[in-house]
Image (tube, rainbow, N blue to C red):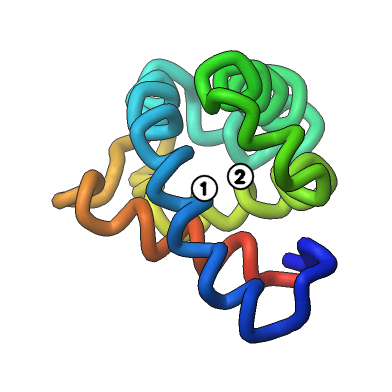
Amino acid sequence: MDFGLGKLAEKAILPRVANQIAPILAEQLPKLRTLSATKLRDDQFFSAYVTQPAWLAVVSASSGLTKLYPSLEPKFAVLMRHLRDELVVFEGESVSLVDDLPNKLPAAIVSGLSKK
């Protein structure tokens, strides 16, 4: 993720960003278990019914993080698809989340934000 600060500064910022948004996303991700696997795999549905509400939650609860790091918004959809791929378990039409989600979430956020 390019915050316009250079690669070293960016590497230092990503864990901080992840730690700030992890609790917000930890509240949002369990809602995925109520949806079908087919719907979650559909990128348009996922964007409208998962990514957009999660983004609004981050904006409203992050105490200005999104204004401090404006490049977070364009990367958020990529991040959310990465979290879906890394943290959601699909078994047929059943959806669950990985074990130990709270501990795995910050690293998955850093990894997702690092994607180009």
- On-image quarter of the N terminus: bottom right
Q: Which mark is residue 98?
A: none
**Residue depicted at 71% across the width and 22% down the height:** 52
Q: Along the horizontal axis of the image, is 110 left or right of 31?
A: right
Badge 2 marks a residue whose secondary structure is helix
Going by the numbered disc 1, the residue's amino acid type is Arg
Q: Along the horizontal axis of the image, is 14 left or right of 15?
A: right
The residue that label 2 is drawn on is 80
Q: Nearer the viewer, mark 1 or mark 2?
A: 2
Q: Along the horizontal axis of the image, is 75 left or right of 88?
A: right
**Residue depicted at 35% across the width and 33% down the height:** 23
**Residue depicted at 38% across the width and 52% down the height:** 87
Residue 7 location (% of width, % of height): 71, 84
The residue that label 1 is drawn on is 84
Going by the numbered disc 2, the residue's amino acid type is Met
Task: Confirm whether residue 72 shows in the render.
Answer: yes
Say which of 48 and 15 sits in front: 15
Compared with residue 116, is residue 112 higher up or lower down, i.e. above or below? above
Say which of 60 and 108 sits in front: 60
Residue 66 location (% of width, % of height): 70, 35
Compared with residue 78, is residue 31 higher up or lower down, i.e. above or below? above
